[in-house]
Image (cartoon, helix red, strand yellow):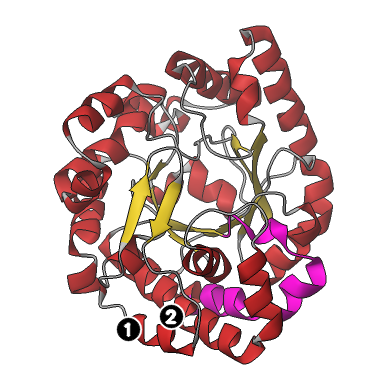
Amino acid sequence: MRLGSPFLQACRGEPVPYTPVWFMRQAGRSLPEFRAVRERHTFAEMTASAELTAEVTIQPVRRLGVDAAILFSDIVTPIASMGIEVEIQSGVGPVFAEPFRSEADLARLRVLEPATDLAPVLEAVRIAVGELKVPLIGFAGAPFTIASYLIEGGPSRDYARTKALMLGEPVLWARLLERLADITIASLRAQVGAGAAAVQVFDSWAGTLHPDHYATYVLPASTRVFAALADLDVPRIHFGVTTGELLAYFAAAGADVVGVDWRVPLDRARQRVGGRAVQGNLDPAVLGAPWPAVAAEADRVIEAAGARPGHVFNLGHGVLPGTDPDVLARLVEHVHARTAKASTPADAPENARL
């Protein structure tokens, strides 16, 4: 199945029978079946249960017909597994009880032992892979974005503390990012070992940085992450928000696929990432418009991606909670039909047989 997966083929820049589709945050509050689970369980309970994690991971594949699943988890899960106190607050995100401020805090970041620290996560991967007929994407946070959460204590509008530490204490900053890179590497390698067929590294907040600062203070750690995954022979995706001026660096870090938010047209993004595949990039807010507008905007993305191989259709960020899942399913069908090549029955979407 995987060798013929349109998603994996597109990630590798190979010809595909149709443009594959998946959505960031496709498992979540937009699905009624997810809300039903969420009414009975907290986020912590869901991610602590391999069975619940696997079920929620698979739900959007069943309902939407997407060409890949992505593990239901959070980018701070590996950090939390070490005993660092963090709460995933609804509508806010990860909030740390004791933010990182000094050299002494580094001692709190021990070596990640995936077999024990991430046991439920890895079992969820194995369960989901055993049931899915499409590839499963593993994921982790990039060192910069995890560092920003640790230093700020949670989401931030200006990342003032993060930038102050980065510029004012560059040696400590480098040591922090190196340790976080090790954690990201260990987590992703373990997910692939459990069956993930691709990985996505979320550097969600890297777009807050000046390109020179990114190149100097962040790129080395990100490059280390991607280099450490190269021998696994799985597609490596790199994504961030408002990273139009960083796309060339995202490609240079070693990603096979560069995710693009809706602020940069894909034809322009292709020029910036060289020969890398691209992923994206419909504005998630568009999905609230009438269907003709959604279809027109999807067609604009497809046209900007061009006829050459190497495009995974996605949103420019995550599915918004109020999105109608029927619109998501219709969008998958539309992209498949709009991009379909002359095909045989064997080329039919794998997920149609799930």
Label at residue 182: 2
Q: Residue 349's image quarter? A: top left
Q: Is residue 138 or residue 109 the one in the foreground? A: 109
Residue 161 occupies which quadrant of the picture?
bottom right
Q: Which residues are magenta?
A: 203-228
- Disc 1 marks a residue whose amino acid type is Val
Which residue corresponds to the image point at 74% horizontal and 80% vertical from the top-left? Answer: 216
Task: Please tell me which residue lies in front, 275 or 126.
Answer: 126
**Identity of the residue drawn at 48% across and 21% down:** 322
Residue 111 — which label?
1
Magenta span: predominant SS is helix
Binning the other alpha carbons within 10 Å of mark 1 as few (below 14), some (14 to 19) or many (20 upward) gives few
* Mark 2 closeness class: few <14, some 14–19, many ≥20 residues within 10 Å: some
Q: Is residue 71 visible?
A: no
Which image quarter holds the C terminus?
top left
Toward which corner of the image does residue 232 lie, by quadrant? bottom left
Q: Between 154 and 7, which is closer to the camera in this rendering?
A: 154
* Tag 2–tag 1 contact (CB < 8 Å): yes
Residue 276 rendering spot, x and y as whole percentages:
69, 58
Q: Is residue 43 above or below residue 195?
A: above
Taking the magenta stretch, the answer to whether it contains residue 181 is no
Is 326 left or right of 279, judged from the image as shown?
A: left
Which mark, by number, is residue 145? Answer: none
Give the quadrant of the N terminus. top left
